[in-house]
Amino acid sequence: MATSRRGAVFLDRDGTIIRQVELLHEVERMRILPGAAQAIKLFNEAALRVVVVTNQPVVARGLSTEADVRKLHDVLNLRLKKQKAHVDTFYFCPHHPNATLEGYRQACECRKPNPGMILQAAAEHGIDLSSSVMIGDTTQDILTGKRAGVKTILVRTGHGGRDPWQYDCVPDMTAANLMEAANLWLTRIGL
């Protein structure tokens, strides 16, 4: 647990950092979006904790195991590190209310748009939510951030706010991509 509380950057994964591929479970299909690694590097250089929060229904559907998801995240971080960037912590929700695998069939607090992953990260890492931001490509991401009490930025990559589930919420800011979102947030907090 950190001794001093500071803000964090919460990032959606698919459509925000990497190319949107529905039910991604094959490492070889994972592609980092242009400028995403550089944006994460800016957050790293500003000493902001970078936390990925992502729903992973591939586990609930039996397409991947939780270990497979962690392995994919390890590969993503290795690719980011080649560009001098890194994600500090990954959180993922393996559950789904209509899961194929009974053990994952549940309505939970960690599945976005519920704020469970953000709240867990804040508790485990001493994150000041009032100084934090959630950046994602869906209204689900924006609602998650709102429910957690953080600022929100919608990026126009991936679903670009045109997600099929469409929650009624308005982001605090919008950006063309993660790099523009990074510049917006760092300017807003004076870094």
Image (tube, rainbow, N blue to C red):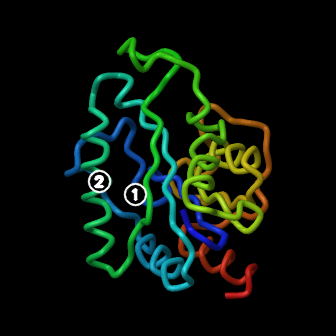
- Packing grade of label 2 (10 A; few <14, some 14-19, many >=20) is some
Q: Which mark is residue 116?
A: none
Image label count: 2
Residue receiving disc 2: 30
Position of residue 83 in the picture relative to residue 53 (left or right): left
Residue receiving disc 1: 18
Above or below residue 62? Residue 11 is: below
Above or below residue 16? Residue 178 is: below
Position of residue 32 in the picture relative to residue 48 (left or right): left
Identify the element where label 2 is drawn: loop
Q: What residue sits 31% from the left and 59% below the top? A: 31
> Which quadrant of the figure contains the C terminus?
bottom right
Real-space CA distance between mark 2 and mark 1, rounded to the nearest whole angstrom: 7 Å
Q: Are marks 2 and 1 in contact (CB under 8 Å)?
A: yes
In the rendering, at what x and y percent does residue 169 appear?
Answer: 79, 44
- Packing grade of label 1 (10 A; few <14, some 14-19, many >=20) is many
Q: Amino acid at mark 1?
A: Ile
In the rendering, at what x and y percent does residue 142 appear?
Answer: 69, 49
Q: Amino acid at mark 2?
A: Met
Q: Image quadrant of residue 1?
A: bottom right
